[in-house]
Image (cartoon, rainbow, N blue to C red):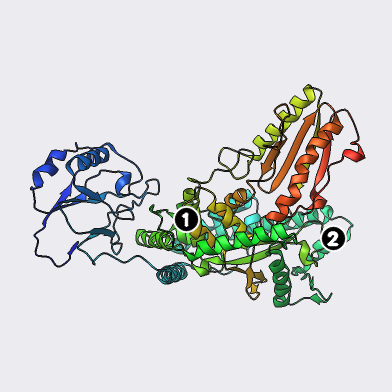
Amino acid sequence: MLRVGSSEQEIRLFAAYRPPGTKMCVQDIHAIFQEQTPTLIIGDFNAKHKAWGSHSISRAGRLLMEDAQRQGYEVLGPDTPTHVPTDIRHRPDVLDIVIGHKIRRPMHVKVMYGMDTQHLPILVTVGSGTSNSPPTTADVEASANLLVEKIKEAQARATTLLPSSTSHRGDLPLNIKRKLRLKRRLHKLWTRTRCPKLKKELNGLSRSISEAVRDFRGANWEATIDRAGESAKNLNQLCRQLTRAAAPKCPITDRSGIRRYDAKARAEVIAEHLAEQFTPNPPATSPNLQKHHAQVRNRVEEFMATTPSPFPGDLFITPAALHKKKAPGLDGISTAALRHLPRRAIVAMNIVFNGILRTGHFPEEWKRGKIITIPKAGKDPRVPENIGPITLLSHVAKTFERALLTKLRLFLTPSQEQYGFREGHSTTLQLIRVLHYLASERNCERYTVAVFLDMEKAFDRVWHDGLIYKLMDTSLPPALIRVVANFLQRRSFCVAVDDVLSAPRPIRAGVPQGSCLSPELYAVYTDDIPTLHGHLEDWEDEVMLALYADDSAYFASLRRADLAAKRFQRVLDLLPEWLDKWRMAVNVSKTAALLIGSQKNMPDETAPERSGG
């Protein structure tokens, strides 16, 4: 479709198509152009180039781009793909483009996703004042809510709830299952023929199956009794199996020491505890550090008050890569529903995603998390501190986060010591690196002093202003920083206990659990952890640093254990200031020091100090 603004000037319009595999002849384009007549050529040229939004550059696209630069005409493409294949192995891409010659007015190309076809039509708008205005935050919020509601409606219409089955045929042995299949075939045949011989055979097979099932159940139950021990736990499980009684509800003790049995009350107690956990560590009282914290807040507030230029790139992602067995968030949209979305819905979803990039606004409903709880092994489940939270986020939001992560990784490079959540790195590689260092120093008859640090509530207490401040010092475009900042701020959560939700609580700190962006952001936040780089003489060896996600380890080696400990202490002297500066703390109970070498005990006067922040 073509929409032209009011003008007396004539525009010549041509539709074109170049089949795949044919030669790209730019001379045909030259033959259409006239010297001063505005001309538009619109169609599928099967010519890909990143200049007009394609994911790759083909030979035909390179020829067309070089000819456009030489001849001075313009090649435009839409913001979103025009070809969305049904085969998930093929990536959506921009194939339909617009070639403009001597067009003196602005042009805008938009994909029309109202048709259910692989090749989507495009709308070309020519003329000032006729192009679409950029989206606003209200537009993004309304579009995101409408998208979620439409997906929920489609999922409800396409979902059939089956009644819970009480059959135990799944645990029957193979020989009985074969008899059951034979019985079904004989029954179907008898209903058609009413043959007395088949009826007699069917009755005999039914009696044989009943006896086999009875024998199997009896032998199975006798084996269960033989395996049962004399402990109270085993006897309790056996009694519950006999009576088919549900597991007793474990109460939660609130702050006043009262045990709460009601599901709503238990959810509120856990939510109150987690709300304190998702709070930044208290700031230091030092005047210099208070001044630093004020500078960080002021710089972040000034940045958020400005409107950066929109991010020039576009997103297009399909939810086919989502895990099949992931629990949904508060919106109830499953991964199966997203994986079966039609092309029109996928294009609409990506329009919302690109609107988020343009405005820097992350939809508020996507910031709400649903927390389910699992008791920690070996600890009293009645205490809220002994319950581990698992956050369930919206899968629509996680689809956008996965696409945003690919953009962030173009600009963010973690330190070489960080082996957590990095492509080509793993726990095994970090262990090999550490063991190789220890073995090499041992072979050189050196002592190695090691300290293993554990950050207290590392992911849950990341200071948001400090993280945004550090992102501003990277090469990340301001538009993406604004998206990340909006992604972190004004988040909330609810706790679910027995399908009963607590009241929403705010999240004032931390990177969201369950988001693929969180490990990358945490790596940026701790990228400047102190080392002795720049504090050593030329003849002194560096203290080795090993990082894996939120775990840190330092290693220092010398021929004397006391000298190695003294060099190590120089690193630990830098650590408290860094912890207070960025409002972090070390979990002292999980921090350990180790001396590796022939000396069994480290001297007390040279033992590294532990810092609790």
Relative vertical location of residue 96 with respect to residue 533 in this rendering, above or below: below
Q: Within 10 angstroms of label 1, few (less than 14), some, or many (20 or more) residues?
A: many
Where residue 252 appears, as percent x and y from the top left, is 78, 71
Q: Earlier in the sequence, mark 2 or mark 1?
A: 2
Q: Quadrant of residue 342?
A: bottom left
Q: Which mark is residue 478?
A: 1
**Helix, strand, or loop for circle 2?**
helix
For badge 1, the amino acid type reads: Pro
Task: Give the total of numbered labels.
Answer: 2
Of residues 562 and 134, the one drawn nearer to the viewer in this rendering:
562
Residue type of the residue flagged with mark 2 = Lys
Horizontal and vertical percent position of residue 178: 58, 51
Q: Is residue 202 above or below residue 157?
A: above
Q: Nearer the viewer, residue 207 or 600?
A: 600
Q: Is residue 228 left or right of residue 466?
A: right
Q: Quadrant of residue 567?
A: top right
Badge 2: residue crowd in 10 Å (few <14, some 14–19, many ≥20):
few
Whether residue 512 is visible to the viewer of this picture, yes or no, is no
What is the spatial separation of the Cα atoms under label 2 and label 1, in whole angstroms? Answer: 58 Å
Residue pointed to by mark 2: 233
Res 72 label: none
Q: Secondary structure at mark 1?
A: helix
User: Which of the two residues, 361 or 78, is positioned nearer the viewer here?
Assistant: 361
Q: Nearer the viewer, mark 2 or mark 1?
A: 1
Quarter of the picture containing the C terminus is bottom right
Quadrant location of the N terminus?
A: bottom left
Name the spot of residue 250 as percent of width and height, x first.
Answer: 78, 69
Q: Residue at x 22, y 64 (%)?
A: 128
